Amino acid sequence: MQTTGAGSLRLSKQASRPQLQSRATTALSLADVHRNPNWLDPNSLQSSPASRAVSRKQSFTHLGRLAGNASDADDSASLRSFAPTLDARLDGESMLGDLPGHHATPAWKALSASIERDDPFDAALAEDDFLSVRIQQELTNLDSITENGSNEEHLLETWKVKLKHFFILSASGKPIYSRHGDDQLISHYIGVVQTLLSFYQSAHDPLRGFTAGETRFVVLSKGPLNLVAVSRLRESDGQLRTQLESLYMQILSTLTLPSLERMFSNRPSTDLRRPLQGTDILLDGLADGFTRGSPSTLLSALECLRLRKSHRTVINDTLLKVRSANLLYGLIVAAGRLVSVVRPKKHSLHPGDLHLIFNMLFEAGSVKAGGGENWIPICLPGFNNTGFLYMYVSFFSTSERGHDPEVERSTSAGKDDELAIVLISADKESFFELRKMRDELVVQLDRNGSMAIIKTAIRKGHASCSDIVPGTVLRHFLYKSRGNVQFAMPSFEPHFHGLVARRKLMSLYDNLHQSIHSRTAHLKVQHCIAYDATALALETPLFELYCVAGQSASRAALAQGANRVVQWIRREEERVFIIGGAVF
Amino acid sequence: MSSRKKILLKVIILGDSGVGKTSLMNQYAQSAYKMNGSPNVTQVNKKFSASYKATIGADFLTKEVLVDDRLVTMQLWDTAGQERFQSLGVAFYRGADCCVLVYDVNNSKSFDTLDSWRDEFLIQASPMDPESFPFVVLGNKVDVDESKRMISSKRAQAFCQSKGGIPYFETSAKEAVNVEQAFEVIARNALAQEESQDFNPDFPETIPINIGEENQGCSC
């Protein structure tokens, strides 16, 4: 890890920072806390008076702490160097906590003070940063064990440093799915898990989770399946359990619940990998999404493509006009964002089901690889976990050339095929009917200009935070409309480039979400200050809002930014959210 | 390699403490590199885990073998014979494809308890058809001097016969006698058990959803 020159200084600083652990701040007033961005203190997350009363162990310093483990520069770290604006009036001792042995060298202090701190999120992205290496390798797949087993130890090492694992095993302890590592590598770990689960099950006290070092294990038992999440990203049990629920729903969407139960009641030793063959790619897509951080899963909400109300109305009307008799749901989806939906009055769409569809279409890539036109039996467990629906999927290029339905259907999907029409029916014989509807829909959308409008909106992408709220200190936000089960957010750019910054941002959101949703803390507003960011979370019966700004933003500026986001949403509600949709 | 689906088999090994269950597993794990197996069963890989026996009462070995043309992953569940682990719980035994009962031919008590190990397994695992569930009995430590032998081959075979013709092997984990042959039969019988109840999963049954109700609200 050690390099020379300026690079090593920065590395040491970042790597060692999180090793520092301290008690809750005793800062006397909020203002003091503001002026002393205090990454050192995990509890500084909850620095508002209301929240400080609530004791919490979680912090988002963990990402860095992991990095620190590998650095031998820790001891040279300076506590003070990370709070260069430390106010002398504060009680330094308690601010820094009891950390015997961690004393700053004068040289280090001087160097740290001179390090530019304009955008610590970006600074954390230095290529030599240990964490970024770690996260970037997180999603790479392990090789298989060679015939003579010579690479086994190497694989095991690679496997063990993964920050996150998902395992699915049958109630008899047979492996069904693992994000990393094949049977050869994981089978005996699965045995260990099963033995532990069995022990607690026979005591009628099922194991729900445990911690080993910095690693959290969460177990979800669903009938004949046990699902286990292993995370070093400090997600809450609730968040990990939501992720496991989603993997479970993916399995149901392949098999249906009655079929799954029948297989295991007929034969407890069922090796479920066989009926699930080919769906690993979907589970991987979901798992990797969770590891990268998914606002949609965190909030259990959908994101929509922002369109003018009048434009969306035209699209909705078009959908209704061309709706065929056996259609259950019709969706127009742009790169994971919903453009429009047509649905029966009595049935809304479950966000979890839509997540499965979006994952299948846009993350896993398996459907796109099949070309422009697909017919997929799928169980949508949120809608009905006992049977299959039939899904007609057709992809479109978002480039500006015109459409010939016949031609587009037959050409295979390209890289920019981000737009999909999804038509779902309960009738398995309705392929030709839905294809006809799709063709008509495309003709109509082209004719009334909607297709061009959709494609333009897709190409524009997310608006940046400063476009939405000019001049704000906010760098990113998540706004969830509770009534609509939808959320809105700005682009990750320009402040959060790449996987690492995005993962850090999502960890921050995870934390805010956790605090707001904790059963013991009835927080309505939460203000957090950390080394590299300040954040504000607030909830009302109508919405949840999570805002993130740079580390020097004041609480007032954050609050002002939050208010302006709320105003923007209020103004744009019918653009950023689908309200009602096309209902028949 | 053919695209034929791999099968994972769960095999549980039971028997008193000290009869050599772990040694048998070790021996089997190492046999991968000796290549002296029968032409039909070839060990292609091995994996021997760290020991968990002292802490959770079980150890695990994963090994891929070819049985005829089928690639099979053997997931061996080795148990601690001690009293304190004697009930590992239903979920430990559930869904096993074969159960291996081990005793020490020089220890008559370990032979006498075979029946209760078998009962324990049948109670806990409650297989669909207990009569035909595949067991294999191994009489281990045949390398020890004949004068110390307590259980004759004849007596063991009579026991196995009385339990519905359980295959019986006399083994020495220490000197690698009969270990591979025994595990070959274990793999075959487990595979046969697995396939006897085969369920055709390729096309899960379609359950039609009645959407009549949904369409009632239609007013378009």
Image: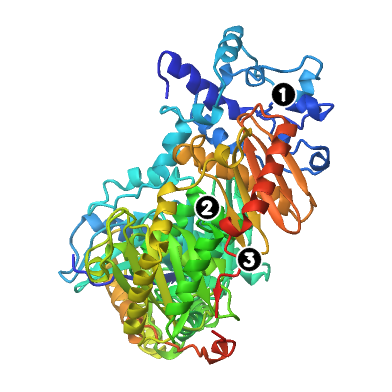
Q: Residue at position x 67%, y 53% from top?
A: A570
Secondary element at image label 1 = loop
- Mark with earlier residue (2, 1): 1
Circle 2 or circle 3, nearest the eye: 2
Which amino acid, by three-letter code, is at mark 3? Answer: Tyr
- A482 vs B132: above or below: above
Element type at mark 2: loop
Q: Taking A183 as reference, is A474 left or right?
A: right
Mark 1 and mark 3 in contact? Answer it, CB < 8 Å: no
Q: Quadrant of residue A436?
A: bottom left
Taking the spot 27% from the left edge, 66% from the top edge, the residue there is: A370
How many numbered discs sit on the rendered protein?
3
Residue in the foreground of this view, choosing between A554 and A136: A554
> Dot 2 corresponds to which residue?
A294
The C terminus of chain A is located in which quarter? bottom right
Which of the pair A244/B97 is nearer the observer? A244
Label 3 marks which chain's residue?
A
Residues beneath discs 2 and 3 located on the same chain: yes
Residue neighbourhood size for the residue with mark 2, other residues' Cα within 10 Å, grouped as few (<14), some (14–19), many (≥20):
some
SS at badge 3? helix
The mark nearer the N terminus, 2 or 3, is: 3
Kind of residue indicated by mark 1: Asn
For label 1, count other residues whose C-alpha is less than 10 Å away and answer few (under 14), some (14-19) or many (20+): many
Q: Position of residue B74 (x, y in %)?
A: 34, 67
Q: Are marks 2 and 1 on the same chain?
A: yes
Amino acid type at mark 2: Ser
The picture places residue A288, in percent across and down from the top left corner, at: 44, 53
**Colouring scheme, one of rainbow, by chain, secondary structure, one colour:** rainbow
Identify residue for label 1.
A36
- Percent across and percent down for residue A133 are 42, 35
Residue of label 3:
A200
